[in-house]
Image (tube, rainbow, N blue to C red):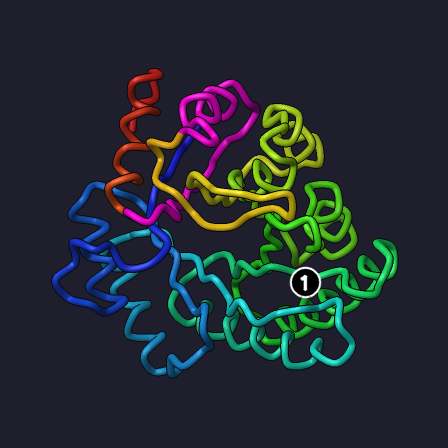
Amino acid sequence: MRILVGTAGIPASSDERTTEGGIREVKALGLHSMEVEFVRGVSMSPEKAMEIGHVQKETEIKLSVHAPYYINLCNPEKVRDSQKRIIDSAHRGHLMGAEVIVFHPGYYGKLDKEEAYDMVKQACIEMGNLVEDNKWNVKLGLETTGKVSQFGTVDEILRVCRAVKTCIPVIDWSHLFAKYQGKIDFREALSKVTDAGYTDIHTHFSNIEFTEKGERRHLTLDHRQPDMEKVAKVILESDLKEINMISESPILETDALFMKSILEKLGHMF
C-alpha cells in the first residue's frame, strides 16, 4: 500500500507564504502532498496555476484542490453559482497538476434526502460533462460531511459516484466521527468504499469537536477524537492500494508529521 501524508494549505513553517513556497516546504518536511485551499473563492489566475504546475512537476508533490465553502448543490437558487465555483476550481486544478477537486455537496434544506440526491447527481453530471469536454485531468471529489443537516454520508457520496464516472468519494474521517456523534465504525465505512471499487482514495484527517448538530471545529490530534492510531490500523488492514491523508489539524504540518510517525510505528515503511 502506498500512503501519502500532507497538509491542507501552506505549512505554518513555510517562510514563503505562497502556494509554490508551501509545496517546497511540504517537500522539505518529508511529506508527500498538499491541498490548495480555495475556501473563500477562486481568485487564482490561470497563469498563476500554470506556474504552480511547474513547481508540482519539479517537486512531485501530489496536489489536490479544496473548492470554496460557499457551495450548495441542493439549493435551486445557489446551484449555478456553486457549479461555477467548482468548475473554476477544476480548471485551476488541472493547470497546476492537481488530481482531485474536493467539495462539500450541500445542505438538505427543504428537500427530502431523495430530492437532494437527485439535485446533486444532476449538478455533478453537468460538471462532469464540462470536465470531460475540456479534457481536464481531474476528478470531482465529493467529501463526506460533518453536519447532520448536510448531504454527505458515505452511502450518499458513493451513490453519486456510481452514477457519475467523473466523481470520486473523499473520506473525511473527522466529519464522519462528528456526524455520528463519535459512534462510527471506520472499518465498515472504509469497506463500503473499497467494495465499491475505490482502492486509491483521497482523505482528510484531524480531531474534531462536535454537538448534536455535528461538527463544530477542528482540534489537534492529541484530543484523540477520533484516535489516529485506531484509524491507521483500519487503513493498514484494508484492501487499499493508495491513500492520500491530508491533515486539517489547526497545527497542520506538526500533526501531519505525527500522523506519519504513527503509521511508521505500526510498521508502514514510507
Residue at screen point 48% across, 42% down: 209
Q: Nearer the viewer, residue 47 or 146?
A: 146
Q: Residue at x 58, y 55 (%)?
A: 141
Q: Quadrant of the N terminus?
A: top left
Q: Which residue is mark 1?
A: 106
> With 60 as the anchor, is 12 left or right in this view?
left
The number of numbered badges drawn on the structure is 1
Q: Which residues are magenta?
A: 224-252
Q: Is residue 227 above or below residue 119?
A: above
Three-letter amino acid code of the residue under disc 1 = Gly
Residue 11 lies, in percent from the top left, at 24, 54
Residue 261, above or below 61: above
Residue, x 57% and y 24% (percent of image)?
239
Q: Residue at x 52, y 22 (%)?
A: 234
Is 66 included in the stretch rendered in magenta? no
Observer-nearest residue: 73 or 213? 213
Q: Quadrant of residue 112?
A: bottom right
Left or right relative to 63: residue 115: right
Residue 38, how many percent across, how many down?
Answer: 43, 69
Q: On the image, which quarter does residue 118 sit in?
A: bottom right
Residue 218 against residue 177 in the figure, above or below: below
Mark 1 secondary-structure assignment: strand
- Quadrant containing the C terminus is top left
Q: Viewer-proximal residue, 43 or 227?
A: 227
Residue sitting farthest toward the front: 212
Q: Position of residue 80 (x, y in %)?
A: 69, 80
Placement of 20 over or under 160, stated as above or below: below
Instruction: Tell me if mark 1 has few (under 14), some (14-19) or many (20+) residues whose alpha carbon lies within 10 angstroms of its own.
Output: many
